[in-house]
Amino acid sequence: SNCSINITTEQVRNKFIDFFEKNNHLKLPSSKLIPYSDPTLLFTNSGMVQFKNHFLGIEVPPHDSIVTIQKCIRAGGKHNDLDNVGHTTRHHTFFEMLGN
């Protein structure tokens, strides 16, 4: 059976954020694509970049549960699939990572 759902990317974002906000998550904005405060990174390449100092114990997170939609640039790395950009419908150089 062919099942098609007409939903925009904006609706997906809103449903994602709404679900987690209803479940006591603090919504934070996307970090900048160039993490100026982190000299170890050239670009924000994952949704976890903005939480690096929390994981390292340098900063305390503002809430126990957080939801974000992080703008990211595919720039290579451990699981480098940069060669697939432009050859598949799911590999792009710019993407948004939804996370909680």
Image: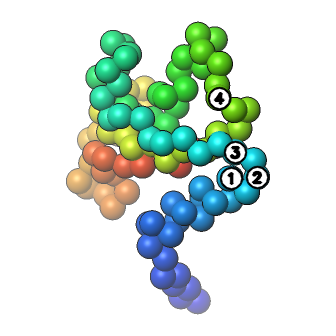
Pointer 1 residue: 20
Q: CA distance from mark 3 to mark 4?
A: 11 Å
Mark closest to the chain's N terminus, 3 or 4: 3
Pointer 2 residue: 23
Q: CA distance from mark 1 to mark 3?
A: 5 Å
48 vs 17: above or below? above
Q: CA distance from mark 4 to mark 2?
A: 16 Å
Pointer 4 residue: 62
Q: Residue at x 37, y 49 (%)?
A: 95
Are the residues tagged 1 and 3 within 8 Å (C-beta)? yes
Residue 78 visible here: yes
Question: Mark 2: few, some, or many residues within 10 Å (few <14, many ≥20)?
Answer: few
Q: CA distance from mark 3 to mark 2?
A: 6 Å
Where's the N terminus, which quadrant? bottom right
- Give residue 68's position: percent from left, percent from top: 54, 44
Instruction: Place residue 33 in its image quadrant.
Output: top left
Are the residues tagged 1 and 2 within 8 Å (C-beta)? yes
40 vs 79: above or below? above
Q: Residue at x 49, y 76 (%)?
A: 7
